[in-house]
Amino acid sequence: MLVPGCWTIAILGLALVAPAVAQQRTTPRPNPRLEQYQREAAQEVDARAQFTQQMVDQIFSFGELGFQEFETSKYLVNILKQNGFTVQEGVAGIPTAWVATWGSGKPVIALGSDIDGIPQSSQFPGVACHKPMVPGAPGHGEGHNSGQPVNVTAALAVKKIMERERLPGTLMLWPGVAEEQLGTKAYYVRAGVFKDVDAVLFTHVGNNLATGWGEGGGNGLVSVLYSFEGRSAHSAGAPWRGRSALDAVELMDIGWNFRREHLRLPQRSHYVIKDGGDQPNVVPPTASVWYYFRELDYPNIMAMWAMGDSVARGAAMMTGTTLASEQVLGSAWPAHMNKVVAQTMWENIKKVGLPAWTDPDQRLARALQRELGVPDSGLATKLPDSLSGGIMPMGQRMGGGSDDIGDISWNLPTITLSFPSNIPNLPGHNWSNAIAMATPIAHQGATAGAKAQAMTVLDLLLRPEVIQQAWDYFRNEQTKGTQYQPIIRPEDRPATWLNADILNRHRPEMRKYYYDPTKYQTYLAQLGVQYPTVRQPDGSCGGGAVP
Ligand SMILES: [Zn+2]
């Protein structure tokens, strides 16, 4: 996947490693009935291409941030209910989380994907230059609008075959809420959402059709909000009577930046100041700073967190303030993806192949790459050479992004399918990552992903030995020396208040841009965007009409 903020890209680049695990999967025996169902499922996915496109476009138009995915969840829950799924809402105490199930008995196959957006990434789709729809508003600058459409389309294609053939098994769909805050999946695990599930097929937007297994391509993390309390006073009239909480925040940041020199190389740590006071002539009585501490494994994440705590206490002592609270806002284990399920998915990826990109698709991609000053290689036209995977030796791991799918991956066999709905060489978490995400690139990529997903669900339904071998790998290889323990503490609760203020501020304007599929076949048509719109010789960035 193309986004450094999440974990998948790194694991997909992990072809290097001496596999610590013996080859264990036997070549599947020919199974004409399964192959027939898989061909049918792919046709069913193609027949639903317009439905997939509408979902991709609709969720793009909502552009909601983590924990505020109310429109997105309402929309998806309605679709799933209309299609016979039973939906439990408010899962794990999270208002926008839900679990939808259909079918009965074993196996239980869970299809998940994230649904949240990125701050300040509002962007007209199909326009290869920076052009926000609502300036300052969030948008899908990570492409999380496309994963649920992959899963819903795949599930409905498989469900049709299951109904007709009376195949036993349960399909479960669920959203990654607030993935950008690493905010929910550890809570799903704690709430027992996956306790009866046999395998998780997670999907994430990328720029190729790919999957991987093993460990070593990213970091886990803990996300902590440190809040300080001081005493206000007139900043000029009686500054000696004040104690600045902002001073504590600044000294914590300075302390951390010095400490950073003496940390292990694979760490990543970063912060933003959430509260820096109100105005200069009032000594700030409150201030807070939000840290992500990323490291390679659980013990090192916990050690880094403890270091952060001591720097925070030191800052409070230096400034005569108090460390009033320390809130955990999110967490993620570094992921370990299942070898057997990944191999099964990979066989299907090879059957599906990449979409046949059109000239306008490639022109948009190349124009955007030139706009960003990166190689204008266009869209991927070739699958990866082989399935990537392995257990990277600790000493070779470079660290990187995180994804809280990691917590799930340590509780049951899990993989991530990366599907080609975005353009290569983009920075991630940026307006440019939104440009393709409601265009034919995203639509075709999601359809390709849904085929691979549906075919793999059928493998898991019809070949019980795959699930057996996946659990053998999980129990006897993956978790042999490593036991999952949550990073979140028993008293921690999902930070469901996050981003509410941002959505309250921007939603009235954003609402004007919600997609109406009853009036327009595509979102591009509704916006009046000529596809593709690229920078003109006179330097102007055309395209995009005000609704
Ligand atoms: Zn992501």
Image (spheres, rainbow, N blue to C red):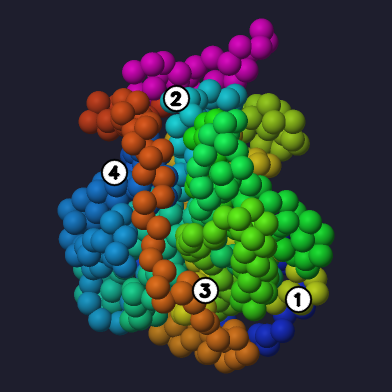
Residue 13 placed where, x, y %? 70, 61
Separation (CA) of disc 4 from disc 2: 18 Å
Q: Nearer the N terminus, badge 4 or badge 2?
A: 4
Q: Is residue 544 magenta?
A: yes
Type of residue at label 2? Met
Separation (CA) of disc 4 from disc 3: 30 Å
Type of residue at label 3? Ile
Residue at the disc numbered 2: 133
Q: Nearer the N terminus, badge 3 or badge 1?
A: 1
Q: Is residue 468 above or below residue 371?
A: below
Numbered tag placed on residue 71 in the rendering: 4
- Kindly identify the residue that appears in the image at 41 percent across and 16 percent down: 545
Q: On the rendered structure, is 462 left or right of 363? A: left
The residues colored magenta run 525-547
Q: Nearer the viewer, residue 241 or 333?
A: 241
Q: Is residue 420 magenta?
A: no
Residue 64 placed where, x, y %? 39, 42
Callout 2: helix, strand or loop? loop
| Number of residue marks | 4
Type of residue at label 4? Glu
Can the viewer see residue 159 in this picture? no
Residue at the disc numbered 1: 394
Q: Quadrant of the C terminus?
A: top left
